[in-house]
Amino acid sequence: MKPNADSSLRLPTKHVLVPLGIGTALSLLGDGTLYTVLPKPEIAAQAGVTLALVGLLLGANRIVRLIFNPTAGALYDRLPRRGLLIGSLCIGAISTAIYAAVTGFVPLLVGRILWGAAWSGIWIGGNTVVLDIADKHNRGFLSGQYQTWFFLGVGIAALLGGIFTDVFGFRGGLWLSATLNALAALMWFIFLPETRPVSEPVSHPPNHSEDKSFPWQIVLSISVPVIAVRFIHAGVMASTTILWLSGFIGEQLTFSTFVVPIATLTGVFVALRTTTSVVGGPLAGITSDKLGNRWAVIAGVIALGAGGTWLMSGSLLSLAILGVLVGSIASGGVQSLVPAIVGDHVERAQHGRALSVIYTFGDVGSALGPPLALLLVEVISISMIYRLCAVLFLVVSLFALWLSTTESRRCKS
C-alpha cells in the first residue's frame, strides 16, 4: 500500500453514503415543490408568473448548469470534496428561501440560477465521492445506493412539497423547505467525512493524467441514455404530472368525506413513481456488477421504460399507473450505471470532468423538456406526447444494445 493511501477508503461506506444521501435528498425540497405545484395555474398566479413562464423557470436551472457543471467538475478534480459539497448545499438553501420571499419572473429566475449552481456542486460532488470509495467490484452497487437516496429525495420532495403547500400555503411551505435545507448543510458539516485520496495533489503538476486526451467517445456514448431519461422523466413528465393526473382524477379525489387536493395527490403520486426507481437503481447496479456488461443492463431497463411510458398514454387509469411503475425503472437503472461506467473506463483524475460533461448533456435534455411539453400540450394531447417519449426510449434502447454487443466482442477478442 502506498504510504499516503487515502484513509477515507478504510471508512465503512455507510459512514459516507448515509450522510451524503440524506443531505442530497433534503436538498431537493425546494425544487421538488416547484415541479409539483407550480404548473397549477392558481399557484403560478400566487408566484406572479404565467403558465408559459413556469415552463421557462422549471428549465432555467438546467440551462445554467451548462456553465456550472464544467466548473464543478474541474473543482472536484482539484480540491477536497467536503467544503465544496457543504457550500453547494448552503446555496441551495438560499435559493429555496428566494422562492418563498419573492414574486415575479425575474426574482424567481435568480433563485433558479442559484439552484442550478447548487445542484451542479451537490450532484457532481456526490457521485465523485461515490467513485472515491468504490472499486471495480462494487461500483454498480454503491452507485445504486446513492441513486436510491436521490430518488427517495425526489419522492419525498414531491410528497412534502404538495403537503406543505396545502397545509402552510405556497410560501409557508417553501420557508419550511429552506429551513430543512439549512439543517442538512449543518448535518454535512458535522458528519460528512472527506474522501479525496490524500495521495492526489490539490493542484496537479504539469503532464498530470488530467491533461491527457479526454475520453470523449465513452463520455458521449454514456450521455445518450442520460439525455433521453432526463428529457422524459425530469423534463416532460415532471412538468406535466399534475396535468396528466388531473385528466384522470380532476381537481381532487374524494373518499367518503375525506378530500385529497390535487397538489397533495400529485405529490403522493410522484412519491409512488419513485418507489420503482428506488428499487430499480440498486438492482441494475448489482446486476451489472455480476454480468460485467453494463450496457446490456441499460438496454433492458430503457426498453422497460419505453413499454411503461406507452402504457401511461392510455385512457385506463390502472394500466397507466402500472406503466408509471414499470417506466420508472429506466430512470433508476440508467442513473445508477452512469458513474459505474465512468469508474470502469475513465482515469480517477478525470472523474469530475467526465461526470460534469455527461450531466451537462442530461441537463440540456431536462431543460428542454418542461417548456417543450407545456408548449405542445396546447397543441396535442398529453397522451400523444407520452407516446412520442416511448418511441424515443425505444430508439435509445437499441443504441445501448448495439454498444452492448460491441463491448462483448471486444472482451472476447
Image (spheres, rainbow, N blue to C red):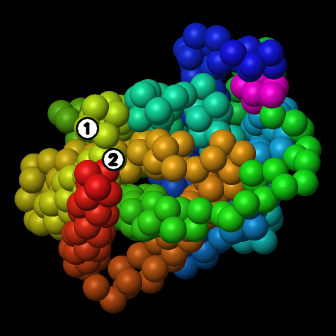
Q: Nearer the viewer, residue 202 or 71?
A: 202
Residue type, mark 1 in image: Leu
Q: Is residue 198 magenta?
A: yes
Residue 376 visible? The answer is yes
Q: Which residue is mark 1?
A: 291
Residue 298 screen position, x and y as percent: 30, 52
- Residue 249 falls in which quadrant of the image? bottom left
- Residue 122 falls in which quadrant of the image? top right
Q: Which mark is residue 294?
A: 2
Is 370 situated above or below 320?
Answer: below
Residue appearing at x 58%, y 58% in the figure = 359
**Dot 1: within a 10 Å radius of its alpha carbon, few (fewer than 14), some, or many (20 or more) residues?**
few
**Dot 2: what SS?**
helix
Residue type, mark 2 in image: Arg
Disc 1/disc 2 C-alpha distance (Å): 7 Å
Residue appearing at x 59%, y 62% in the figure = 215
Residue appearing at x 75%, y 30% in the figure = 196
**Dot 1: what SS?**
helix
Residue 18 screen position, x and y as percent: 57, 19
- Kindly give the residue lying farthest to the bottom in the view shown: 379
Left or right for 211, reference 284: right
Q: Which residues are magenta?
A: 194-199
**Helix, strand or loop: magenta stretch:** loop
Position of the N terminus, as image quadrant, is top right
Q: Which mark is residue 209?
A: none
Position of the C terminus, as image quadrant, is bottom left
Residue 394 screen position, x and y as percent: 22, 69
Is 249 situated above or below 372?
Answer: above
- Residue 222 falls in which quadrant of the image? bottom left
Q: Nearer the viewer, residue 168 or 85?
A: 85
Residue appearing at x 60%, y 25% in the figure = 133
Q: Nearer the viewer, residue 131 or 242?
A: 131
